[in-house]
Amino acid sequence: MSNHLKGILMVLSSTAMWGLVGILVQYLISSEHFTPEWLVNTRLLASGIILLVITYIFYERNIFKVLKTDFISLLLLGVIGLLGSQYGFYICINHSNAPTATILVFLLPVFIMLYTLLVKHKRPSGLELISILFAITGTSLIVTKGDFSSIILSPIALIAGIISALCCVVYTLQPRKVLSKYSATNVMGWSMLFGGIFISCFNHTEQEVSYL
């Protein structure tokens, strides 16, 4: 299997998983009364630890080396990129619903296109513009089933959704240099751990789970 095909399959699978997460988060918030803060805090801390263990066992024995050379990059990726995108996504779901949040987050290609235009001075091709249009239209039709009355767009949901999409741009573009030197599991593990630790400093709410 070529690297190009692997990349396409990874993008498709990660997109599907992101959509599934939206549905599960909406259920946990609305039915089980979890808070967005507790969910994102737990998710980042647990994922970070698991990825670092995987890195140590299968990829890099010296998982701390990256901290000496790229600590600031990992911190920014964790706090702005990962925490910002996930927390914004969860807040958007909390104040609207999963379909609305998903549509807003899938503005990501538009923001990346604007970045390449304004920063890299590279104009998008006609094919890229058409692809983005189809992606947003297709996502909107899938998550709403053609019924756009299901979209709930409060001011808080709109702001949180846009912030989430912008932070997605950060974690899509920012870690390219560090990923060229270290494994993806190592980079993402430390970044998730930093993001989880950061929100832990502000997350003092007690999470009550009805079935405990």
Image: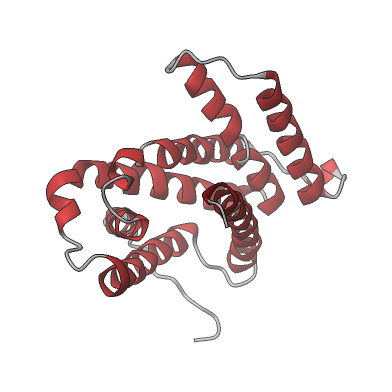
The answer to whether residue 58 is above or below residue 7 is: below
Quadrant assignment, res 129: top right
Residue at the outermost right position = 146
Which residue is more in the foreground, 57 or 161?
Answer: 57
Number of callouts: 0
Q: Position of residue 96 (x, y in %)?
A: 66, 48
Residue at the outermost bottom position = 212
Q: In this view, does 86 lie to the left or right of 102?
A: left
Q: Is residue 84 left or right of residue 144?
A: left
The answer to whether residue 70 is above or below residue 129 is: below
Q: How is the image coloured?
A: secondary structure
Residue in the image at 48% along x and 51% along y: 86
Q: Is residue 75 left or right of residue 119?
A: left
Q: Is residue 100 left or right of residue 38?
A: right
Residue in the image at 84% along x and 43% along y: 149
Q: Position of residue 3 (x, y in %)?
A: 52, 50
Residue in the image at 69% along x and 45% along y: 100
Which residue is more in the foreground, 176 or 169?
Answer: 176
Which residue is more in the foreground, 94 or 16?
Answer: 16
Residue at the outermost left position = 68
Q: In which quarter of the image is the N terminus?
A: bottom right
Q: Position of residue 161 (x, y in %)?
A: 57, 40
Q: Where is residue 67 in the image (x, y as percent from the top left)?
A: 16, 52
Residue in the image at 35% along x and 60% along y: 185
Quadrant assignment, res 111: top right
